[in-house]
Amino acid sequence: MTSQETRTSSVWPRNFYVLGKLPIVATTAAEAADELCRMAVSRTTAARHVHLVNAYTLALADNDDAYAAILSGDSINLPDGKPLSIVSRFVKHAPTLNQIRGPKFFLDAFSVGRNYNVRHYLLGSSDNVLEKLQERLALEFPGCNIVGVESPPYRTLTEQELKAQDRRIRDACPDIVWVGLGTPKQDREAKRLSLSTGVTCVAVGAAFDFAAGEVREAPKWMTRFCLEWLFRLFSEPRRLWRRYLFGNIKFMQIAWRCLVRNEAGLSVRK
């Protein structure tokens, strides 16, 4: 067992597997939300950064060792993409990787978080989306505690701006910072923030936009049949065509390696 495997299994006591270059946790959606909230409020370990991993994430990590390093070590990676669970079944993982969709995981954590008095901080998207998001969360999850929201500029922040942002987050004393800045920027920021603020940070993709009703979710049948990417592509073709063209082709290469060479066969239990 490598030091990386030891750290991951000790933080999140579940089986996990390596797909491509990334360790991915095998758990259920309900367990993941509960585990996140318990970990965030316990403060018994150093802050961790949590990521929702899909085919595009694996493709980027396969081409970029620096990015792969961010999603390793003290990172907790959950299988957001349906294709990951399909590959897991093909290589006969036991238990298999179950899809944990980012938008639902986000809402589940707000629901479960009320049992733990979790303090949430929302970082990302636009002021308009954040306003609608807060209204929806307060209505659907009465008693949820949002201690801060922030929409950063759509550019790289200066060092002074980052320090000021981190100070605002620390002053709000959240248990979880939800980071919705888009892949791969949000993954880098979640790790940086967890180290800077000492708070558990979750890179949650477009969950803000979905939950606020700004972006339509794919029909359930498309999600079930691994076609959610196609729905999103038709919804935003100019923005997403490169992502899905590159990501899907690269992911198929990774999946083929897993099937032929059994690269994904490592299972760790605590």
Image: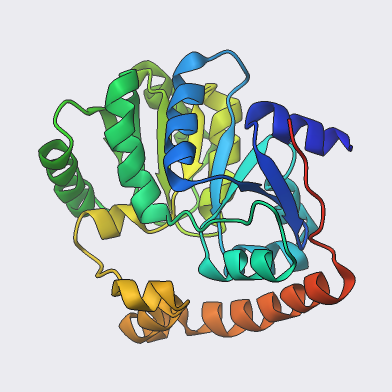
Question: How far from the left and from the top, in percent, is residue 164?
Answer: 43, 28
Residue 215 to residue 17: above or below: below
Which residue is at the front of the view, 112 or 134?
112
Instruction: Name the residue nearer the viewer: 247 or 27.
Output: 27
- Left or right: 226, with 62 as reference point: left
Residue 240 sits above or below residue 33 on the image: below
Q: Going 80% across and 38% down the picture, which residue do you hit?
A: 5
21 with respect to 221 (left or right): right
Q: Position of residue 78 (x, y in %)?
A: 56, 49
Q: Quadrant of the C terminus?
A: top right
Q: Is residue 262 left or right of residue 124?
A: right
Q: Quadrant of the N terminus?
A: top right
191, above or below 188, in the image: above
Counting from the top left corner in percent of width and height, residue 13 is at 65, 31
Q: How is the image coloured?
A: rainbow
Coordinates of residue 111 in the picture (x, y in percent): 27, 35
Whether residue 221 appears in this view of the structure is yes
- Residue found 28% across the figure and 58% down from its top: 209
Question: What is the quadrant of residue 176 in the picture?
Answer: top left
Q: Is residue 151 visible?
A: no
User: Which quarter of the picture shows residue 79?
Assistant: bottom right
Q: Nearer the viewer, residue 81 or 90?
A: 90
